[in-house]
Image: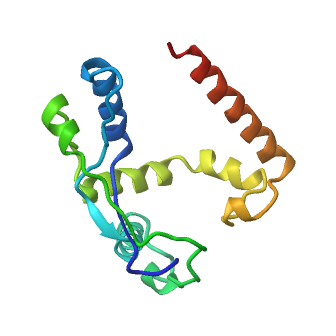
Amino acid sequence: MATAGISATWLYVEDHARALALVLERGRLGDTYNIGGRNERTNLHVVETICDLLDRMRPAKDRKSRRQLITFVADRPGHDRRYAIDAGKLEREIGWRAEETFETGLKKTVAWYLDNGSWWQAILDRGYHGTRVGLLQPSPSIASDLAVDHDLSRMLLAALP
């Protein structure tokens, strides 16, 4: 983990999807809406919370806390210290608010990953091993997936008015 003091605003994926749908439905054409959940936490707090959730939801065989596994690495070049979002306009004009707190959203996310091991195991099996993707050339299978994602993104953008 990089520097512990770096912070970001965290948002549960279903809250984000709901915000996007509401912007499409109620937003003004050409306006910009920031989507954020008012859940700013440091990276260290996020990692410690994930460790605690895993310890409760799927305890290690030796019953030791996963917090002991946390290691610190050098920050990547140009790493910002804070990623914060002001979602005030979205809240005022569209009426959106995040339904999940940081704690409930992260608990649901960790539970999803625990319940869907075959999904992420397939990614690991194709050659991804937790390294920073931007520093290495992707394996041929991952490069193929990235090309498909790029083509899909181009298709979706072309379909926009």
- Residue 40: give x, y in percent of width and height: 28, 63
| Residue furthest front as drawn | 30
Which residue is painted at 52% across and 83% down in the image?
69
Q: Position of residue 149 (x, y in %)?
A: 67, 34
Front residue of 12/84: it is 84
Q: Residue at x 27, y 22 (%)?
A: 28
Residue at 80% of width from left, 39% of height from top? 144
Taking the image as shown, residue 5 lies to the left or right of residue 104, namely: right
Q: Nearer the viewer, residue 32 or 85?
A: 32
User: Would you say 116 lies left or right of 83 here?
Assistant: right
Residue extending farthest right: 140
Colour scheme in the image? rainbow
| Frontmost residue, 161 versus 54 | 161
Residue 2 rendering spot, x and y as whole percentages: 52, 78
Percent across and percent down for residue 75 are 56, 78
Location of residue 159 with respect to 21 vertically, above or below: above
